[in-house]
């Protein structure tokens, strides 16, 4: 009985992941992507995620950074503005066009490159970057182990990514999403790191309330929820409630 | 795409160097062109300023 449920869940994830990839590459999804996700309460998420990336990378000036699944370049542009040499890779042409225009507006086209590519077969030689990051990627990844190994192959030093967690509010929220979304337990992440040959340096956990909630509510209310959220997360049981985890790892 | 990118990228399939053939340039930016693997000969298009280094099995049938 238990076994059949596991199989059924795995099958469902598979089907939805493919659908997720198609969903992601639609033109109108790219156009509305930032507007829909990072306005209203979503701004708090955006700020927290950017801080997580900056904390992990440390001083970014002159560092060679690769962002996997860079989308419209939310992090790519931020890192380029701070003086990193950034490459953003994504599967979607429409998302990258948005990123390209954003880079031109921000005046960072000189130290930022964008390209379409497959995260499982990266177009770079080994040890090409100081840091390789992937935000909001692993929940749409159908082969997380091979993607993480590829990230490690092209990194000289650091690999940083986030995951959405199992057994949290995210599990409920997942059912309401138009695209598939893969959730991870701590144990699964450890196993992925082992198989990719990466060492965990630091991990951080946040958001007892799922992203979807923040997106739907106005700024002031979002701030109230965020304060409550922060209090929950810093409580003794808090880490277990976190729907999002940030993983800061190193190439040994 | 900037020409400097050639120092960083390689063929996603066999990781060998790529040759650049420029079709259209806009100031310093390469808008249309081709990246050709010096080993396997696979071609990767540059479309609207963005190189498409997706392996052939992941590329759309009709280019945009």
Image (spheres, coloured by chain):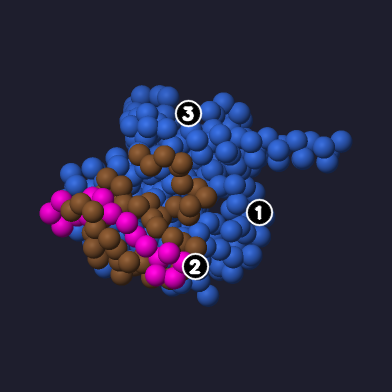
Chain colours: A blue, B brown
* Local secondary structure at mark 3: helix
The residue tagged 3 is A213
| Disc 2: host chain | B
Residue found farthest to the bottom: A252
Badges 3 and 1: C-beta atoms under 8 Å apart? no
The residue tagged 2 is B14
Query: CA gap, disc 1 to disc 2?
Result: 30 Å
- Image: magenta residue range: B26-41
Look at the picture and state if A217 lies above or below A223. above
Q: In the displayed structure, does residue A250 sit left or right of residue A47?
A: right
Q: In the displayed structure, does residue B48 sit left or right of residue A195?
A: left
Q: Residue at x 87, y 36 (%)?
A: A1
Few, some or many C-alpha atoms within 10 Å of disc 2 (few <14, some 14-19, many ≥20)?
some
The main secondary structure of the magenta stretch is strand
Q: Earlier in the sequence, mark 3 or mark 1?
A: 1
Work out whether residue A32 or residue A164 is closer to the camera in this orientation and state it: A32
- Which dot marks residue A188? 1
Say if labels 1 and 2 share a chain: no
């Amino acid at each position: 009985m238990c076994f059949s449920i596991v199989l059924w869940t795995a099958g469902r994830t598979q089907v939805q992941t493919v659908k997720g990839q198609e969903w992601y590459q639609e033109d109108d999804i790219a156009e509305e992507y930032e507007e829909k996700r990072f306005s209203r309460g979503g701004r708090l998420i955006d700020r927290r995620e950017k801080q997580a990336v900056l904390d992990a990378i440390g001083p970014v000036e002159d560092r060679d950074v690769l962002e996997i699944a860079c989308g419209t370049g939310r992090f790519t542009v931020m890192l380029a503005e701070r003086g990193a040499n950034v490459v953003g890779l994504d599967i979607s042409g429409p998302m990258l066009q948005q990123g390209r225009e954003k880079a031109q507006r921000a005046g960072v086209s000189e130290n930022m490159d964008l390209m379409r590519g497959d995260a499982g077969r990266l177009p770079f030689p080994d040890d090409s970057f100081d840091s390789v990051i992937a935000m909001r990627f692993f929940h749409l990844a159908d082969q997380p182990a091979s993607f993480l190994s590829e990230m490690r192959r092209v990194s000289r030093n650091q690999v940083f990514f986030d995951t959405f967690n199992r057994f949290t509010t995210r599990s409920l929220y997942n059912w309401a999403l138009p695209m598939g979304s893969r959730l991870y337990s701590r144990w699964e992440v450890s196993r992925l790191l082992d198989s990719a040959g990466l060492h965990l340096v630091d991990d951080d956990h946040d958001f007892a309330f799922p992203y979807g909630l923040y997106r739907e509510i106005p700024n002031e209310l979002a701030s109230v929820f965020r304060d409550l959220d922060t209090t929950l997360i810093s409580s003794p049981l808090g880490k277990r409630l976190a729907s999002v985890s940030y993983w800061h790892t190193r190439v040994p | 795409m900037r020409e400097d990118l050639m120092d960083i990228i390689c063929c996603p399939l066999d990781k060998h160097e790529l040759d650049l053939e420029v079709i259209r340039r806009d100031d310093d930016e390469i808008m249309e062109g081709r990246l050709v693997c010096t080993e396997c000969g696979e071609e990767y298009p540059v479309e609207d300023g963005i190189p498409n280094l997706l392996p052939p099995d992941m590329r759309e049938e009709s280019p945009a």
